[in-house]
Each structure stands twice: as C-alpha cells, then as structure tokens.
Amino acid sequence: MIIIALHSSIYEVLNEYISLWTERLPNQLEGLYLHGSIVLDAYTYDSSDIDFVVITKNRLTEKEIQILTDIHKVIACKFVKPDLDGLFIVWEDLGESRPADNVSFPYYNGGKIGFNTHFNPVTWWLLKKKGISLLGPDITERPFNVSSRLLTSYVLENMNSYWAGRVIKIENSIEQIKNLPTSGIDEELEWIVLGLLRQYYTLKELSIISKVGAGEYGLLNLPREWHNIINEAVNIRRKIKDTVFNSDEKRINETLQFSKYLIQHCNNIPQEH
C-alpha cells in the first residue's frame, strides 16, 4: 500500500465528501482512490486538483447521478479550494479502454458532471503504480495493469490531436492571445510547455512525472536553445517572478516554436510494438 502524507486541505474535503456519500448514497461507495499530482508528490493547495477515482457497487442510475451532482455542489460551496476532478466507475472497468458493459460513465471536472465512453490509460498507470487508497482494498494490489505500449500510444495520439490542435488554435488567434493580461499568458505558457514535456518524459521513460519534474527533465535532455522557455514555465509553476524575456510577444512566439519542435521530436522517438 502506498503511504504518503496528505495536505490537510485534502483530508478536509474528502472527509466531507465521504460523509455526503454515506448519507445520500448509502451502500454505493466501495472505493475512493487518489492519483494525479498528489501521488506524484507535486500537490500545491492553490493550483492542484484532487484527482480521484470512485468505485461504486453498481452503475449509478440517473437519479443517483442527480444526487451526486448535489453532493458536488455542497462541496464546491463549502470549499473554494482544492477542486475535485474524478470519475465514477465499477470494479470491472479498472484497466480497460472502455467500460466493461459499453455504457458511458460519469465524471466530474470543471464544476460539473459529464459523461465519457473511453478511459485514460494514464489514470490506470498512476493508480496501479502509485495510487493512494483512502477507502476500499489496496488499489495497487488489484488485478489490472496497463502496458507500456498502450500508455505511449495514447500519449503520442494525445500530442498529435489535443496538443497540436491547441498550438494551431493559438496561432489562429495570436492577436487575441497577445492582448491577454500577463497572468493569462503565464497560464497558457505553463500549461503548454510543461504539459508537452510531461508527454515527452512518458515517451522516453515509460513513466509519468509532475509538471516541474518534466521541466527539469527537459532542461537535462533537450537542446540549450529551448532552456529559456522551459525555465520560464517552471518559474511560473513555482510562482517565481523571474523572466529572461522582455515582452509577452516573445514569450508567446517561443512557446509556439518550442511546441512545434517537441511534437515533431516526439513523433521521431522509437516506440515499443
């Protein structure tokens, strides 16, 4: 079992969360597990979510999902931070690419309940390798796994769809981006640079790392010409107000050039078959 000291804010939110489940959806909650920045030892109170997976005894009904929505409204009203981000599945779903019975499953993100039909293998990898079990049997001992091939193929597809698309979107709205406040540009720069570096790390090391860890890895393994923009992203993440760029426009352009370089570079990394 993975044992790690959790920030007090995590305990406060999740104790209330479990109590609400017990009160409003009795006998449904069978497991509550943490992954994401918490298990990567990279959780920060003011910027990290609580990434979780809930295991229920049965698929939630429409009525139960409405009750779940109300539970999350209570949590959101009571706790400004941290935000919750998770999915609601049954035991048979663990390690699968789709729900075992081919139905959509509910998830909670951005303050609302949504539905999906495909699982993210990164979630399974983190649960299996580093998952924290708050309720239910030890998740790292459950009989499921995720292959390196599945992990890397997912990451590469993600780079060439979501991340490449995000770069194109910024290029197509460059004037709007330039007019964002510096804080908005900071947020976009950090998200893209460190997000892509996390994908790069996974493709190279067949593992998963935090955003800052990915930045440090990039500084050790990528050409020096990209170090300024990587350091910029790491400093933003660490809330260090230090920059080598003399304008936001230069930061935006460097972010775009770096993103294109890294996506192309990752497409040339040999993969397991």
Image (cartoon, rainbow, N blue to C red):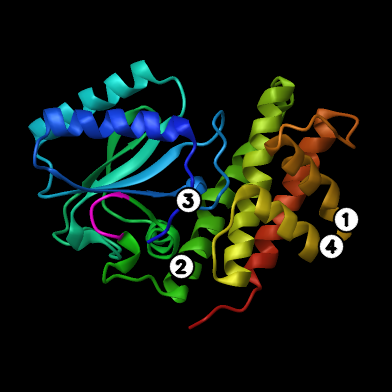
Q: Give above or below for 232 relative to 156.
A: above
The local crowd at label 4, few if under 14, some if 14 to 19, many if 20 or more residues have their Cα within 10 Å, is few
Q: Give above or below for 165 relative to 206.
A: above
Closer to viewer: mark 2 or mark 3: 3
Q: Position of residue 95 (x, y in %)?
A: 30, 65
Q: Are marks 4 and 1 in contact (CB under 8 Å)?
A: yes
Q: Write down the residue under mark 2.
A: 151
Q: Compute the Cα span from label 2 to label 4.
A: 26 Å
Q: Which residues are magenta?
A: 134-138
Q: Position of residue 81 (x, y in %)?
A: 46, 25
User: What residue is shown at x 76% (from left), y 37% (from top)?
Assistant: 252
223 with respect to 46 (left or right): right
The local crowd at label 2, few if under 14, some if 14 to 19, many if 20 or more residues have their Cα within 10 Å, is many
What's the residue type where badge 2 is placed? Leu
Q: Give above or below for 273 relative to 29.
A: below
What's the residue type where badge 4 is placed? Pro
User: What residue is shown at x 74% (from left), y 23% (from top)?
Assistant: 182
Q: Are marks 2 and 1 in contact (CB under 8 Å)?
A: no
Q: Tell me which numbered mark, 2 or 1, is placed earlier along the sequence.
A: 2
Disc 1 element: helix
Q: Compute the Cα span from label 2 to label 1.
A: 29 Å
Number of numbered labels in the structure image: 4
Q: Write down the residue under mark 4.
A: 223
Q: Compute the Cα span from label 4 to label 1.
A: 5 Å
Q: Position of residue 169 (x, y in %)?
A: 60, 39
Q: Write down the residue under mark 3.
A: 4
Between 42 and 98, which is closer to the camera in this rendering?
Answer: 42
| Label placed on residue 225 | 1
